[in-house]
Image (cartoon, coloured by chain):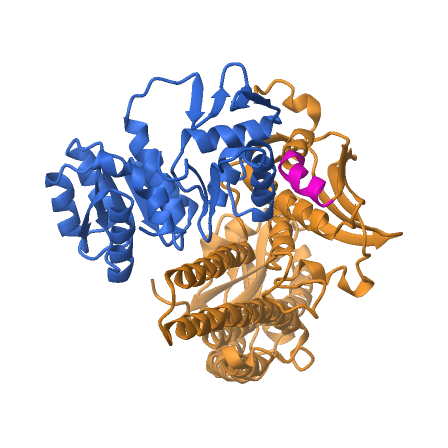
Amino acid sequence: MTQWQNALGTERENGMKVLIVEDERKTGTYLQQGLTEAGYTVDLATDGVEGLHQALTGHHDLVVLDVMLPNMDGWQILETLRRGGRDMPVLFLTARDQVEDRVRGLELGADDYLVKPFAFSELLARVCTLLRRGRVEPEPTTLRVADLELDLLGHRATRAGQRIDLTAKEFALLELFMRRRSEVLPRSLIASQVWDMNFDSDTNVVEVAVRRLRRKIDEPFDTRLIRTIRGMGYVMEVEGGA
Amino acid sequence: MRPPASLTTRLTLLFVLVSSSVLLGLAWVLHTAVERHFVEMDRDILQSKVNVLERLLKRPPAAEELTALQSAVVDMFRSDPELKVFVETADGNPILSPGDIAFPGEKLRNLANGSTPRVFSWWDNGSRYRGLVKAVQPALPDFKPMIVVAAINIDHHERFMERYSRTLSAFIPVAAILSGFLGWRATRRGLAPLRLIEERAASVTASQLNHRLPEDAAPRELTGLAYELNCMLDRLEEAFRRLSNFSSDLAHEMRTPVSNLLTQTQVALSQPRSQREYQEILASSSEELDRLSRMIGDMLFLAKADNGLSLPSVQDIRMHEEMSELLEFYDALAEEEGVRLITSGRAMVRGNRLMLRRAFSNLLSNAVRHADEGGRVGVSIAEHDSTVSVSVENTGEPILPEELTRVFERFYRADDARPRYQDSTGGLGLGLAITRAIVRAHGGDVTASSAQGVARFIVTLPRVPEERVAGVPV
């Protein structure tokens, strides 16, 4: 098993079903492969009509929908789905980052959108978020990864019983990592979640912040929890599987 | 809709219309003047005759002397055979009457009121006559007033006026046609510069946008048009130049990373390698592609900005709060680089939060990157009468004077000796261009200056008065 498959492999037990509607063959195939390896069951449709048919009959948990499609575009598919009472989350892929497009998509009931070209890690992170959204989970007061513990109410971090002092942003960063353990988090997602920087900002900043966090929670201890996945981002997981 | 008639047609018709109405008016004025002149002339002649008659009749003739009177009159006007004389008493008894024409008795009696002589004319037997009528009161008592008329035949006047009218009615159409023709010629000549402009305009193409219309050769009325058209061409040329620079920049900037990726991939494929090596190569490709993808996004943003950026949504923003959040983002990086971050001042602006954040993030990123070790990055916000200025400055290498405006250009990097793509600091050379585009879209501007070891970028934005914002919930 390769390095990052390992990192992504924990959603597998869910067996969530995802439908990709994408007419560009290569893109579609790669997305299918990527999501399959991340543990999802993935169907691929290459034109609008077929996509709509599968979406209506296939009981998918999520649809990844390209806007520009032959026969029937993404808007129409989305509209038909929502009219037909299908409320699974829909993630739009669009080549046009026009504001009108976004507004239209969200009005029609899209749950999120990504502008091409996008990083696969970004797509994966959004898919995870959308699928988690549907699930009702009790809000935990304490997060735990291996011997690292985060007390959300008391704003306290401890590892192996030792108290660790964190700044507010370091705490927020660690919370993000722990809430989304085993997910690869791209730098852009981290910048957006922790600092509200919703655009391509200086990625050095995220690297530095992660490095400083590691210095506090990883370096003094035996095992490393935060790992760098080159070219994709960072992941928090317990080495050798949880 | 029917297209409007050509200018030449319109002007020609106008010429015809104007010249015919002027000529018609003139003909009427002349006609009236000549006629009045004839009347005056006749009146003078008739007046003297009436005077003579009046003297004769002051002593009124007895009935038996009538014949003598008649012959006296005939004698008196013998030299003037055209003159017709008519006298009657006020109750309509003719005293003297020429045998050959009839006088309009009723009309005479109406006119002969008062003592002023009146001119009149009438037709009889195919000829026209003009007469002067006057009431005469004989000097003796018991005599009733008498009506005295002297008249002449005015057929020759009639004939003259008729000839005059005929001549004019032949002349006016000819003159109108002639002036129409001249007008047509003049219009064609006058509009010749327009055709010149048209020819020049036709020669302007995308590859020859530098052609301009002749402003000096055009008559004064057209220089304005030519000037405006030239200005339009200037703007088009500028926009076109920007567009083609944009495409060539893009191609140039993408060539290096794409060729790197290609080389790397092909070298990797040339022989079997360990899994670790493959992973290494793919990861490096991924990083490179990520940069490319970000560059495409940024370039698209700038391309849209070139066509006028519209702000998706606008809100009031507390600049100081925004800046301290941004500084929080750069805090860790600055600390690593040994740079202190300082902020001061407060102000309110109106704009799109995400965009402004991006603009200032670029400035801060630039400042932190260029600050010297142990130096500082300072943000100061100040309010002025109608603007808010935010200055972002850093200690360190000064910006050269010739670079002060160029730093905002796309793909401009201070150190050109560095390979353009592999900028070690990770910048794409688009950040400041994006900052400027965003600030301009907010109705502000950004300038760079450098003095005494401090490089400074000053953003000016329109100010929002604090009190106006006070009631707005945050």
Q: Residue at x 77, y 35 (%)?
A: B342
Nearer to the camera, B448 or B310: B448
For the N terminus of chain B, which image quadrant? bottom left
Residue B69 image position (x, y, % from top left): 60, 65
Chain coloured orange in the rendered structure: B
For the C terminus of chain B, which image quadrant? top right
Nearer to the camera, A228 or A62: A228
The hue in which chain A appears in the rendered picture of the protein = blue
Q: Is residue B329 magenta?
A: yes
Is residue A117 in view?
yes
Residue A69 image position (x, y, % from top left): 24, 55
Rendered position, B292 above or below B331: below
- Principal secondary structure, stretch drawn in magenta: helix
- Rendering quarter of residue A91: top left
Is residue B73 in view?
no
**Residue segment shown in magenta:** B327-337
Nearer to the camera, B267 or B346: B267
Rendered position, B468 above or below B300: above
Rendered position, B322 above or below B241: above
Residue B182 image position (x, y, % from top left): 54, 84
- State left or right for residue B121 relative to residue B136: left
